[in-house]
Image (tube, helix red, strand yellow):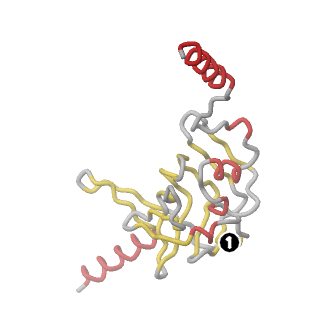
């Protein structure tokens, strides 16, 4: 009985030592495209428009930057706009600290601050637009979409930040214009 346990222990040790160790971190040296990078982080490859070839990634932090040739729009369940530079931090199942992406809802554009999917998958994907989390069907993002190039006269998603008693407030340029016009009208009355 004792020799059987020794033999079994020895066999288990041999098996464990010959098995390759797996890691939850992604080996970015084998990543050839931003779409591979998204997929390796449990995200759908259709989060970015078709044809992205220029990107950088810092493997130690997950911070990435994508460089597009033009500002462009695509349509999922709502319109999504991509600025020339899109950046964020990749984690498994999510993109945090996202910038350069906005989603339209009720004729208003909201900056998308983060994207996440449920693990295990519920079939939904969530866009953090600051005030709410918009949910979409994950199947809408299975493949990269064509992106319609916007002309130079198209509104860009310029954001203004200001400090309101220690609270950082972010506004689109058209909101500031509207507020200033309203204040002028109120002042004239």
Of the pair 34 and 162, the residue shown nearer to us: 34
In terms of image quadrants, where is residue 81? bottom right
Q: Is residue 172 left or right of residue 40?
A: left
Task: Report the residue that reaches farthest toward the bottom.
Answer: 189
Q: Position of residue 75 (x, y in %)?
A: 63, 75
> In the rendered view of the protein, which quadrant contains the C terminus?
bottom left
- Identify residue for label 1: 150
Which residue is rendered at x = 65% and y = 60% of the image?
A: 48
Image position of 124 with respect to 54: above or below:
below
Helix, strand or loop at mark 1: loop
Of the pair 64 and 133, the residue shown nearer to us: 133
Q: Position of residue 43 (x, y in %)?
A: 60, 56
In terms of image quadrants, where is residue 63? top right
Q: Position of residue 4 (x, y in %)?
A: 59, 18
Q: Is residue 80 left or right of residue 68?
A: left
Of the pair 107 and 25, the residue shown nearer to us: 25
């Amino acid at each position: 009985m004792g020799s059987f346990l020794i033999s079994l222990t020895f066999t288990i040790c041999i098996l464990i030592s010959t098995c390759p160790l797996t890691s939850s971190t992604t080996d970015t040296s084998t990543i050839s495209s931003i779409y591979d990078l998204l997929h390796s982080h449990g995200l759908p490859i259709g989060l970015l428009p078709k044809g992205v070839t220029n990107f950088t990634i810092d493997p130690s932090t997950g911070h990435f930057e994508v460089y597009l040739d033009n500002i462009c729009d695509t349509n999922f369940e709502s319109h999504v706009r991509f600025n020339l530079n899109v950046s964020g931090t990749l984690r498994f199942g999510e993109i945090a600290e996202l910038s350069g992406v906005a989603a339209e809802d009720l004729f208003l554009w909201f900056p998308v601050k983060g994207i996440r999917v449920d693990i295990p998958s519920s079939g939904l994907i969530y866009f953090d637009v600051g005030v709410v989390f918009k949910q979409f069907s994950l199947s809408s993002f299975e493949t990269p979409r064509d992106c319609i190039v916007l002309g130079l006269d198209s509104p860009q998603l310029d954001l203004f930040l200001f400090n309101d008693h220690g609270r950082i407030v972010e506004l689109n340029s058209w909101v500031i214009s509207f507020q200033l016009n309203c204040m002028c009208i109120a002042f004239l009355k």
